[in-house]
Amino acid sequence: MNAMKIISVNVGQPTALQVGQRTAVSGIRKHPVPGRVQVGEKGLEGDHVLNRRYHGGPDQAVYVYTREDYDHWTELLGRALEPGAFGENVLISGAESAEVRVGERFLLGAVEIEVTAPRLPCSTLGARMEDAGFVKRFKAARRPGFYARVLQSGDIGRGDPVTRTPAPDGAPTIGELFDADFAKSHDPAELRAWLTFPLGKRQRKEVEKWLAKAEG
């Protein structure tokens, strides 16, 4: 197996997108950056996150996607997508995002991150892909990428090695949390177990909401 590494580091500037009948300004259009990029608790230097209600913050400081997930989209769409197409900050090789677990840690060069939640599709993603139906395709593909908090700041760049540290036993996978967001019902025991792991703040609130409904 090839060693894991960073394929690209991507940041985005505010740009206008046509989202349905409205125009929105978003930082989802991200592009590879040459050289080194500083990463801290709030994310990547030079990156812009405009919708703070659903994106950004310490528990979603870095959004990671994988080359293996890109390979799937290349086969599905019949064309290759450029790094940053999904709005990810870091593209790495050597993982399938749905199989990654909350609490796993990745050492990206000298920067350590901890997995907190899956990315969920939204209309902005559809606008970015210029395909109103892309949200459904993203859901069906079940390759969401993952958000992470920064445990150790530093700088990263293309080609840096990536080291993966397993999550505690029983931690939910990114795929399980992604599926749960679209499920009509949930297992209370499973949800209570998930709450014992280091979920992101927004993800924790969702799980707590599902639990309250399941126990209702």
Image (cartoon, helix red, strand yellow):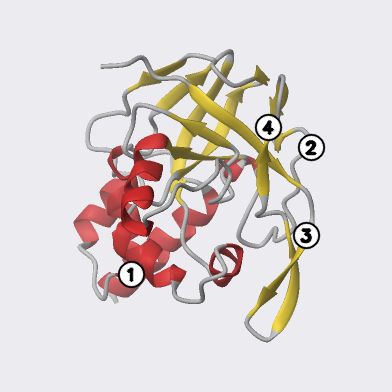
Q: Which mark is residue 15?
A: 3
Q: Earlier in the sequence, mark 3 or mark 2?
A: 3
x, y (%) of residue 33? Answer: 70, 31
Mark 2 to mark 1 CA distance (whole Å) = 33 Å
x, y (%) of residue 110? Answer: 58, 13
| Mark 2 residue crowding within 10 angstroms, few (<14) / some (14–19) / many (20+) | some
Give amino acid for label 3: Thr
For residue 61, which quarter of the picture? top right
For residue 129, which quarter of the picture? bottom right
Give amino acid for label 4: Glu
Label 2's element? loop
Residue position for label 4: 41
x, y (%) of residue 188? Answer: 23, 62
Q: Earlier in the sequence, mark 2 or mark 1?
A: 2
Residue position for label 1: 182
| Mark 1 residue crowding within 10 angstroms, few (<14) / some (14–19) / many (20+) | few
Viewer-proximal residue, 175 or 156? 156
